[in-house]
Amino acid sequence: MRDGVLIGIDAGTSVIKAVAFDAFPIFDPRPVFVMAEELYPGKGTELSNEWRGRQFEYCWLRVLSGRYADFWQVTADSLNYAAKKVKVELTADKRERLLNAYLTLKAWPDVKGSLESLRANGYRLAFLSNFTARMLEANIRSAGLEGMFEAVVSTDEGRTYKPDPKAYRLGLDRLKLTREEVLFAAFAGWDAAGAKAFGYPTFWVNRAGQPAEELGVGGVDAEGTGLAEMVKYLT
């Protein structure tokens, strides 16, 4: 551990040329959950927790069952289910407001300066996310990050979701680089494990301070609570 960052790659021998980000190391989802509590006082947190959990379960269940739907549809379906589960009335207006909140996310406070530092040090930047292309582009505009990313890759291009290895390969195909040349920046522990298992050098942006998942994958190459620590790690 050095300055709060786990060190795994020797800076002198690293061949990393690009950083591929999941959406949530960049975009702060907390306003969505604040809105849920405003719309459903006393029930919003329960609704948000059920919605988030079902969101990712539906991604994986649809891939496994061969009934693919993109992340926007999955997000809508999981919200419908969550509302029924926690017994709140999901009016058309409230449903639209909650869903559209996923198109107007802002960046975490440490993002813009960190991305500028990475670009100044010659790193190519990309998204590799389960978000649809529309969701990614809308949030890039909302966060004021236009022009920061060379590539914006949605797993929808492969009709699959991380942690399917085919999803992680999409980043290599777009960037025309090898696994060793792309550092993957994960937000969730399962995504960090999936990227590491695929063969990416992996930095876990563990903003929530979660323990590592028990998925039989070795530790990530580095871990920190924000992007500033990743910049230190790479530069």
Image: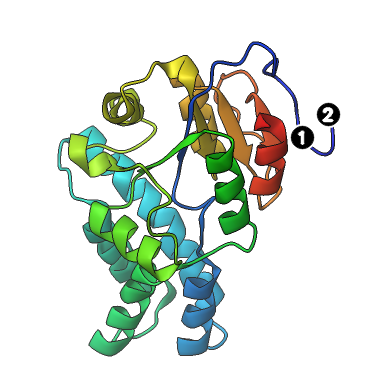
- Disc 1 marks a residue whose amino acid type is Val
Q: Is disc 1 placed on a helix, strand or loop?
A: loop
Q: Are marks 2 and 1 in contact (CB under 8 Å)?
A: yes
Residue drawn where x is 20% and y is 34% of the image: 158
Task: Count residues near mark 1 (Cα–Cα under 10 Å), then give few for <14, some for 14-19, many for 20+.
Answer: some
Q: Is disc 2 placed on a helix, strand or loop?
A: loop
- Can residue 225 be seen? no
Please state, as top left, top right, bottom left or bottom right, where the N terminus lies in the image.
Answer: top right
Q: Name, please, the residue furthest toward the left.
A: 67
Residue topped by disc 2? 1
Image coords of residue 22 (percent x, y): 45, 44
Residue 146, placed above or below residue 94 = above
Check residue 194 in the rendering and tell me which mark sits there, or answer none.
Answer: none
Residue topped by disc 1? 5
Q: Nearer the viewer, residue 126 or 59?
A: 126
Residue drawn where x is 21% and y is 51% of the image: 70
Residue 213, placed above or below residue 152 = above
227 vs 152, left or right, is right
Residue drawn where x is 39% and y is 55% of the image: 54
- Disc 2 marks a residue whose amino acid type is Met
Task: Count residues near mark 2 (Cα–Cα under 10 Å), then give few for <14, some for 14-19, many for 20+.
Answer: few
Q: Quadrant of residue 9?
A: top right
> Whole-Å distance between the Cαs marked 2 and 1?
5 Å
- Can residue 104 be seen? yes
